[in-house]
C-alpha cells in the first residue's frame, strides 16, 4: 500500500511540472532536514491557542494555489499602493497569516534562504489537517515564491454561489477533475462562514421561491434567525458544520440532508457521478480521506514562483 502511494505521488510530480521544476519528497533532506519538524511545531503551538487555525491555514493554501499556482502570492502585503490578493473580496476573511510568519521565522533561523514560503504554507496546511484529526500525507516540496499578487485575480476563485458547471470549469482550468472537486470540497468540514456567503439562498432566491428549495426548510429557518434580511452585522455567521474544528466526513452527510451552507456545496449532487462520490464519502470517512489526500497533493503541485522569499509578506 505504501509503495503504491509513493508511486502515485511520484507519478503526479512527474506529470504536473515542466522539466527542471519537479517537486521532490526529499527536497530539503540535505539543505534543511528539520524543516518539516520546525514548521509542524509552529502550527501546533498556534493550534493550541486557537482551534480555528486549521480551517484558516487550509483555506489559505487553497486560495493560494487557485490563482497563480501554489506560489505564496496570497501572503504578500500591499507594496506601493497596488492591491494584492489579500485585499480581493474573496480573501478579506482569510486570517491566521501569523502562523505562516512564525513558521517561516523559525525555519529561517535554522536554514536561512532555503525553504520557500510556498512550501511552508503547503506543509502547514497538511499539519493543520492532521491537528484537526484528519489524514496525513507526504508533501512534495521545492515550490518557489511568486513576485506578483493581484486582487483582481481573486475573481478566479470558485464562489460559494457557483453551480456545478461553473465549479467544474474552475477546477478544470487548474487540471483538476470532478473527483478532485468533490474531494477537495470536503475541506468545508472545517471553519466558519459569514452570512454574506449564503444569504442569497435565504431571501429572494428567484422569481418563484423566496428560499432556495434545495435547502432543508428547518435548516433555512434556523439560518434566517442568525442572518436576518436587513442585518448590518458583518460578523454574523455560522459554523460550516456542527464539528467545525474536526476534519471529518460530516460535510457530506449534510449535503445529503440538504443542510450545507453554500449553493456550491449543494451543487455536488446535481450530477450522478458527483452525487455517487458524495454518498460514498458520507458513508466512509476512510474513502474521503484517501480521495482528499490524492486531490490535495495534485492541487498543491501547481507551481509558478521564481524565488525563495526571506519574508513571506514581501518579495526579495
Image (spheres, helix red, strand yellow):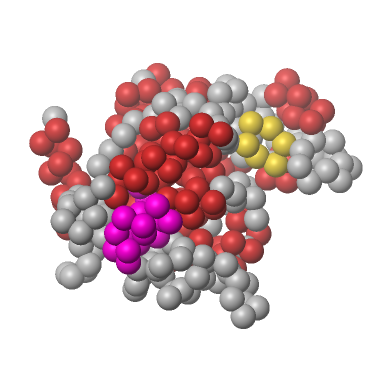
Foreground of the two, 160 or 226: 226
Q: Main secondary structure of the magenta part?
A: helix
- Residue 117 counted in the magenta span: yes
Q: Is residue 271 visible?
A: no
The answer to which quarter of the image holds residue 24 is: bottom left
Q: Residue furthest left?
A: 3
Indicate left or right for 207 with 316 as reference: right
As drawn, is 52 to the left or to the right of 209? left
Q: Nearer the viewer, residue 300 or 220?
A: 300
Could you tell me residue 126's position as x and y percent?
Answer: 37, 41
The residue at the far front in this view is 109
Q: Residue at x 60, y 56 (%)?
A: 91
**Residue occupying the point 47% across, 44% down:** 58
Residue 103 left/right relative to 135 = right
The residue at 53%/57% (across/down) is 157
Rendered position, 226 above or below 107: above
Q: Which residues are magenta?
A: 104-123
Q: Residue 259 appears at what percent x and percent y?
A: 62, 26
Quarter of the image that includes the N terminus: top left
Taking 260 as reference, is 29 above or below it?
below
Q: Quadrant of residue 201?
A: top right
Q: Is residue 124 left or right of residue 230?
A: left
Residue 290, x across and y down, in percent: 29, 32
Q: Residue at x 31, y 34 (%)?
A: 136
- How many numbered badges does the structure rendering display? 0
In depth, the one of 233 and 215 nearer the eye is 233
**Magenta-colored stretch includes residue 274:** no
Q: Nearer the viewer, residue 290 or 72?
A: 72
Amino acid at each position: 500500500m505504501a509503495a503504491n502511494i509513493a508511486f502515485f505521488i511520484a507519478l503526479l510530480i512527474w506529470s504536473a511540472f515542466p522539466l527542471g521544476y519537479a517537486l521532490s519528497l526529499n527536497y530539503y533532506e540535505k539543505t534543511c532536514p528539520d524543516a518539516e519538524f520546525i514548521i509542524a511545531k509552529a502550527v501546533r503551538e498556534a493550534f493550541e491557542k486557537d482551534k480555528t487555525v486549521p480551517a484558516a491555514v487550509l483555506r489559505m493554501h487553497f486560495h493560494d494555489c487557485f490563482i497563480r499556482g501554489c506560489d505564496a502570492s496570497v501572503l504578500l502585503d500591499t507594496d506601493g499602493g497596488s492591491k494584492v490578493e489579500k485585499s480581493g473580496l474573496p480573501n478579506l476573511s482569510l486570517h491566521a497569516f501569523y502562523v505562516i510568519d512564525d513558521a517561516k521565522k523559525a525555519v529561517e533561523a535554522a536554514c536561512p534562504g532555503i525553504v520557500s514560503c510556498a512550501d511552508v504554507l503547503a506543509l502547514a496546511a497538511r499539519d493543520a489537517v492532521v491537528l484537526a484529526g484528519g489524514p496525513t500525507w507526504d508533501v512534495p516540496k521545492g515550490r518557489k515564491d511568486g513576485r506578483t499578487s493581484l486582487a483582481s485575480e481573486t475573481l478566479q476563485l470558485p464562489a460559494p454561489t457557483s453551480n456545478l458547471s461553473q465549479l467544474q470549469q474552475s477546477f478544470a482550468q487548474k487540471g483538476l477533475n470532478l473527483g478532485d472537486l468533490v474531494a477537495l470540497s470536503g475541506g468545508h468540514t472545517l471553519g466558519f462562514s459569514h452570512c454574506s456567503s449564503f444569504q442569497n439562498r435565504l431571501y429572494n432566491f428567484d422569481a418563484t421561491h423566496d428560499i432556495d428549495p434545495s435547502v432543508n426548510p428547518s435548516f433555512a429557518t434556523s439560518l434566517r434567525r442568525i442572518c436576518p434580511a436587513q442585518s448590518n452585522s458583518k460578523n454574523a455567521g455560522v459554523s460550516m458544520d456542527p464539528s467545525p474544528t474536526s476534519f471529518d466526513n460530516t460535510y457530506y452527510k449534510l449535503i445529503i440532508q440538504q443542510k450545507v451552507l453554500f449553493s456550491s456545496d449543494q451543487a455536488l449532487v446535481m450530477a450522478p457521478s458527483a452525487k455517487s462520490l458524495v454518498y460514498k464519502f458520507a458513508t466512509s470517512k476512510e474513502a474521503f480521506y484517501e480521495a482528499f489526500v490524492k486531490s490535495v497533493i495534485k492541487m498543491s503541485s501547481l507551481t509558478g514562483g521564481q524565488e525563495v522569499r526571506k519574508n513571506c509578506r514581501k518579495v526579495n
